[in-house]
Amino acid sequence: MNREQALAIVKLQLTDHRYQHTLGVVDTAIELAKRFGADEEKAEIAAIFHDYAKFRDKEEMKRIVQEKLTEKSFLDYGDELLHAPCGAYLVQHEVGIDDQELLNAIYYHTTGRPEMTVLEKVVFLADYIEPGRQFKGVEEVRVLAQTNLDDAILQTLENTIFFLMKRRQRVFPDTLATFNQLVKQKKEK
């Protein structure tokens, strides 16, 4: 599947605003893939499809988690996280993409996970720092992303965890585990 075909499929699923966000994520993912050695074609396709399920009906996504996915705990952390694992499932079953590394990049683009592949890191980070994003802390992460992928992800996780804590929202276990793994890895170097 080429870029134009993938974008045509995704455009039908998204609002204009979210489609513009997706285009920013795609360009950023390709740039990060070049910089840090990920497969550029996989980064492009994963970025195109990362928000495929963003506007799906919440009840439909809850059913997918309950009936089709092994990780049920997404249901305990609010609706905002559902589009990532459901998106990976739907991209596989509706679009026909079977590349597990690419699907994992979609699945974990909101939460991260310990021992992420470079492709997963690229999509996770591209979603956070794409040019349309404007919020406190994003510029610092963009600067870190120029030279060190793990440092940029660590700062992204820290920002996200603090954001959720300030709002007294629960933090998904994989997000905390990813943060802990990267801190430990950094100290061991």
Image (cartoon, rainbow, N blue to C red):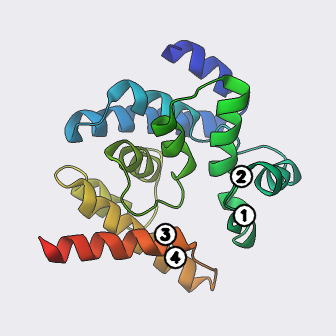
Nearest to N terminus: mark 3 or mark 2 = 2
Looking at the image, which residue is at 43% across and 44% down? 123
Foreground: disc 4 or disc 3: 3
Q: Between marks 3 and 1, how big is the CA–CA gap?
A: 16 Å
In the picture, residue 33 is in which quadrant?
top left
Callouts 3 and 2 close, C-beta under 8 Å: no
- Looking at the picture, tell me which residue is in the foreground, 129 or 75: 75
**Marks 1 and 4: in contact by CB < 8 Å?**
no
7 lies left or right of 63: left
Give the distance between the C-alpha atoms of the residues marked 3 and 2, in whole angstroms.
19 Å
Mark 3 or mark 1, earlier in chain: 1
Residue type, mark 1 in image: Lys
The residue under label 3 is 175
Q: Which callout, 3 or 2, points to the residue nearer the camera?
A: 2
Image coordinates of residue 117 in percent, x first then y, are 35, 48
Q: Any mark on residue 69, and which?
A: 2
| Quadrant that contains the C terminus | bottom left
Residue 160, image x and y in percent?
48, 70
Neighbours of disc 4 within 10 Å: few (<14), some (14-19), many (20+): few
Q: Which image quarter: residue 154?
A: bottom left
Q: Which residue is mark 4?
A: 163
Residue at position x 24%, y 63% in the image: 151
Foreground tag (2 vs 4): 2
In three-dimensional space, the C-alpha distance between marks 2 and 4, rounded to whole angstroms, equals: 28 Å
Residue 72's tag is: 1
Taking the spot 37% from the left edge, 41% from the top edge, the residue there is 119
Task: Tell me if label 1 and label 2 are in contact, CB under 8 Å.
Answer: yes
Residue type, mark 4 in image: Phe
Q: Residue at x 76, y 44 (%)?
A: 55
Type of amino acid at the residue the image marks with label 2: Leu
